[in-house]
Amino acid sequence: MMFDIERRLQEKGVGRGEIVASAMELYVPHGMEAEQAAARLSEKIGRAFDDPNVSSLLLGAILLEDELYWKRTDSEIADDPVFLLSDEIIGMAIAEVIGGTYARFEFTRYDQKKPGILGKLGPFLDDAVAGLIAGCTSRLYSECM
C-alpha cells in the first residue's frame, strides 16, 4: 500500500471495516444486494489506497489532523469552525480523484450525515475518509447503472 496508508489509518482507529460500515449506512441500492455492495466497496477502497494521489491526500489529512488538532490543546480548529475549508477541499479532492464530478455530490451526503466512524473523527480525517467513501460509492453506483 502506498505510504502504508491503510496501516496509518488503522492506527487512528479507521480500519477498512469501519470505512465500509460507514459507507453502507447511507448505501442506496442500485440492483445489488448490500452484502455484495460492501464487498465491492472494500475492493475499491483497497485500490484507492494504492493510488498515490489518494494516498498522499489521505496522508496529508492524517498529518494535518495530528499537527493542528491533536497536538495543540488550544487548537483554533477544535470545533471545526466554518472558516476552516482545507479539510473540505481535501475530502472533495479525494472524492473527485476516485469518482469524478458525481462523487462531489456523494461527498456532501457523507459530510453532512457523518455516519459511523465519520462522526468520531477530527476535522481533517472525517472529510478525508468521507471523500474516500464518496469516491468509491460513486464509482460503484456508476458501474451498477
Image (cartoon, grey):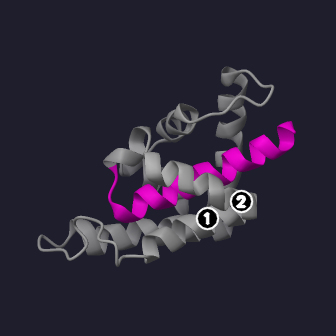
Residue drawn at 35 percent across, 63 percent down: 123
In the rendered structure, are the residues bearing label 2 and label 1 in contact, judged by CB atoms less than 8 Å apart?
Answer: yes
Label 2 sits on residue: 98
Q: Indicate the position of residue 24 as horizontal and vertical percent values.
A: 57, 33
What mark, if any, has residue 94 been given in the picture? 1
Residue type at mark 1: give it: Ile
**Residue 88 in view, yes or no:** yes
Residue type at mark 2: give it: Ile
The majority secondary structure of the magenta stretch comes to helix
User: Is residue 133 magenta-colored?
Assistant: yes
Measured in 3D between alpha carbons, the distance from the residue under mark 2 to the one under mark 1, in whole angstroms, is: 6 Å
Give whichever of 11, 25 is nearer the camera. 25
Q: Quadrant of residue 137?
A: top right
Q: Dot 2 lies on which element? A: helix
Dividing the image into 4 quarters, which one contains the C terminus?
top right
Dividing the image into 4 quarters, which one contains the N terminus?
bottom right
User: Is residue 35 magenta-colored?
Assistant: no
The magenta-colored residue range is 121-145
